Amino acid sequence: MKILIVSQCFWPDSFRVNDIAAELVRRGHEVTVLTGLPDYATGKVPGEYRFFRKRREDYLGAKIKRVPIIARRKGALWRALNYGSFMLHSWLWARFTRADFDVIYSYQTSPITQCAAARSLAKRRKKPWFLYCLDLWPESLRAWNVGYESALFTVMKKYSYKIYNAASRIGISSSSFNNYLQKTHNISAQKILYLPQHAASTTPPGTARRPSSGGELSLTYAGNIGAAQDMPTLLSAAASLPGVTFDIFGSGSELESSKALAKKLNANNIIFHGRVDKKTLEQHYQKAGGFLLTLADMGAISGTVPAKLQEYMSAGKPVFAACPPAAAELIREADCGRAVPSGDHRKLAEEIRKFAENPVAYSQLGQNGLKYYEKHFTLEIFMERLLRELEDLTQ
């Protein structure tokens, strides 16, 4: 098949869509990726991509077409300009390109405006369009403190309705998205497919997954550090457990405020490592005694199950979470850790304290998570299901 992937973010930024594109090529398909300039990690466009350079690249056989964008920088205005510039320039490319494809695949993170090009090309060329929904819209605006009664929310609700209804099929990364799409956007159940995100194994081949067996215990958090990640709950729990080391990897809008809160709490057992490369993170995963997941309860968008949970499972260590029901239910179903309600740092600390007193007793939870990952969340399983859907759409 000739497949067009539309995603504002792509390699060299680290997103799972990179794996998907490479695997499609490996399986014999012709892949083109319509994307922006790589500014996600730093908020700035690297020098080698400025002044119309490197607009066409190759990533493991996938042809990349980059359109101009205004860099993300910091602040709501720059972020809006960033999103708007990709929406406009990708739409213009879709409107005038002569390239033809068998099927279009949207990797729909926030905002949903990045789907404009896919919708336009699918309509113009009468091609099937698979939209992979990772963030619910307009509900995701609630994470930015946009109220339901605001003009922006009203406008984006109408726009989101048009986007979701224009797609030939919608893959959802969390099962709880199903109800929202049906009720809010009148999407039929037959059009929706539950397709959880894949996660690459965090353990290199041949590396043993060993449970903690004594000594200093460390727990790891890895990922974005923003309002949705509810870092105050994690930090408050950590501050009450001075005998446990908490390693935090990643960056985001709340990184500096999180560092300030840790200092205020006199939590010297919290270490902020910032962003690190994949190899470094994998090496640390093998040393960690377990993993941490905290998420704020923000209504419907709290139904998102972050892919970091799948990554944690692949390392074969227990997970300790303070999160909304969707992620908590997955942890309980996999029997891979302990979950308490969002925001309850005392209960989270209590669960970690029990673990610290007898970590070996929790090793089975880690093995349960690994088995669940191998059964549900590998790239191989994801690709088999995705390709069945894409091939069905092109029949």
Image (cartoon, rainbow, N blue to C red):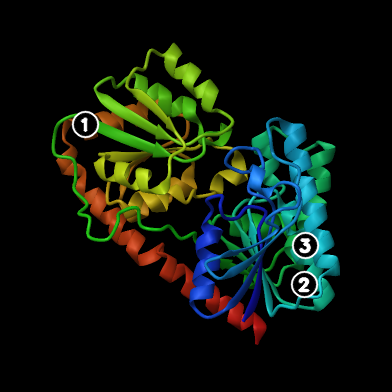
Q: Say which quadrant the N terminus sits in.
A: bottom right
Marks 1 and 3: in contact by CB < 8 Å? no
Residue 287 placement (x, y as % from top left): 25, 41
Is 72 situated left or right of 382 in this image?
Answer: right
Task: Give the residue type at disc 2.
Answer: Ala
Which amino acid does the dot numbered 1 rest on?
Ala
Q: For residue 381, which quarter of the picture? A: bottom left
* Residue for badge 1: 356
Image coords of residue 7 (percent x, y):
66, 58
Tell me if mark 3 has few (under 14), some (14-19) or many (20+) residues whose alpha carbon lies within 10 angstroms of its own. many
| Mark sitting earlier along the chain (1/2) | 2
Which mark is on residue 70? none
Q: In terms of secondary structure, where does tag 2 sit? A: helix
Residue extending furthest toward the bottom: 395
- Read off the residue under disc 2: 122
Q: Nearer the viewer, residue 372 or 50?
A: 50
Res. 88 visible in picture = yes
Closer to the camera, 147 or 210?
A: 210
